[in-house]
Amino acid sequence: MRNFFKGILLGVLLLATGYSNRAFSLLGPFASYQIPSLNYESPFTSIAAQGDIGGPMNLTEEYRWGSPVLVYGFDSSFVEYFGAEGVAAVEAAIKVLNDLPATSAMSSSLSEFPLTTTRFNYTAQQLRLRDIKSTVLSIVLQQLGLACPERFTWTIYQQRPIDGTDPQQYVYSIIQRNFDPVNFRPSAYVNNTLYTYQILQVSADPDTWDCMELAVDVANPNVSVAATAGLQAGVVDPRVYQQVYGALDFVQGGYGLFYSGLTRDDVAGLRYIYRPQNTNWQSAPVGTFGSAAISPWANISFQIVYPNPISPWTVVGGPIFGTTNVLGVTTAGFLNTGGRAGPGKLSFVRVDTDPLLGQYLVPVTISYPETVIDQSGVAIRQVAARTILAPDIIFSAQDLGAYPNDPAPYVYGVTGTTFLQTPNPGVPTAQDGPGIIETGIQIILSKVGPWLFNVRDTDQLSGIRGFTWGSFDGTTNAPIIYPVGASAQELESRLFP
């Protein structure tokens, strides 16, 4: 016990002296020990229809996008429900990622990024609004390979029964799946918030246990943006939950919360995964082939074009060109599998689809130069190309249904997340990673519309207002209310008849 309090005192002293403590968590397919009874793949979900889409990975087992250029778009269901302002809200989330500098331009300490970006708009909070931009930003971070660090600072690795105990008792092994972005060692900090843990039984039907993180600091913890989409079934410090999801009431929270940008640990995770020094053995994305569409010696480092220049479905903003960080030698062939470095920066490009079909009537071709290390250790410089009929990420709006044991509707859903691993010929035994996240993801926001939560056979006045989608920030501007045509006045009349 004395050592425990000495550890707490040390953490408080480090915080007081300004020492930066942080960590990130990596997302991938569920490992063999990540079973539902230990609250992985859990049936309990917070806001997403799918719940957990993966589990925390060990260092060097990260999954990432295989292409440095990602195309996104909107289908007709999203545009019809959320309109141009909803599209702009998603664009604002993507802009946060596009505005990130290359990893080589980041400082080693990442001190240029804040420890907390959580903000509240109190008008939006009273109207029970959930911010589209902030929700989408967190979902996309998860799709880029980040897990929730607040949830996996400590996590259960194994559980074994103790013979002769009634009720049944267990012994556990606890591991860490949070890693310091500088020295890559396991860390108990997230954005300078120190966490300890408590093992507890989450449910007796089915029997489920979890390792709940508890913030040592008496002040509110600094939560990551990745937390919103990453908590899901996790059991965390109630202060973390309340910051991310709002007050603990009968309906999903998150009212009035928005993020001013990415936190230091969000950026730390992205830097680890996508830095050029991180070379992984991996295949090119499915459908990639060699191309001479652009010269690997030119200043243009990626290009997105339509084969048919008169197609009415055009690249938003005109032809797209950008830059990446690649070096190497030339070759006439195309090497599909080999050692690929992180691109240093991801570029998100919006390309509009057919508004009815949600796909391109004329295929879109993405070309970019890359350097791949073959099995002989030779660096091969080549041009990779993908021809796609639909965006890598498409945003939709649907009625996603409700929880199995709760009438509250889900907030969002994600389909199509696929983790692919390429066996490394230099590693004789199978590993849990690294690998790539395959394209073809659909991010779906609920369009169930305004709803009320009633307990027992009660009337409208007894109903508790559920969430409504909105767009807002820290200014005095009135929040934007969705669906298209909704207004704050109408919402107030429903809340306060």
Image (cartoon, rainbow, N blue to C red):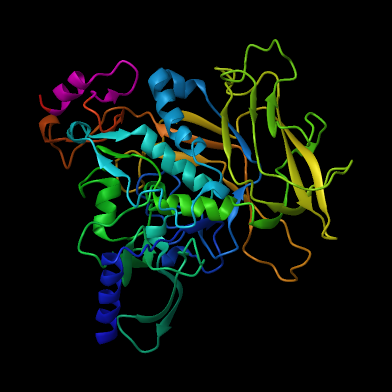
For the record, the magenta segment spans 477-495
Residue placed farthest to the right in the image?
A: 332
Would residue 202 be seen by someone viewing this image from the given angle? no
Corner quadrant of residue 47: top left
Q: At 34% from the left edge and 63% from the top edge, which residue is drawn?
A: 205
| Quadrant in the picture for the C terminus | top left
| Quadrant in the picture for the N terminus | bottom left
Q: At 20% from the left edge and 47% from the top edge, which residue is drawn?
A: 249
Q: Count all numbered tags in the image, as a single digit.
A: 0
> In the figure, is residue 16 to the left or right of 311?
left
> In the figure, is residue 229 to the left or right of 143?
left
Corner quadrant of residue 67: top right
Of 133 and 11, the residue lying toward us: 11
385 falls in the magenta region: no
Of 362 and 367, the residue lying toward us: 367
Q: At 47% from the left edge and 59% from the top edge, which residue is drawn?
A: 25
Percent position (x, y) of residue 445? 41, 33
Percent position (x, y) of residue 19? 35, 65
Percent position (x, y) of residue 185? 49, 70
Corner quadrant of residue 366: top right
Percent position (x, y) of residue 448? 35, 29
- In the image, residue 120 sits, relative to residue 108, either above or below, namely above
Q: At 15% from the left edge and 28% from the top edge, which residue is drawn?
A: 495
- In the image, residue 31 sits, relative to residue 73, either above or below, namely below
- In the image, residue 288 sits, relative to residue 52, either above or below, namely above
Of 312 and 203, the residue lying toward us: 312
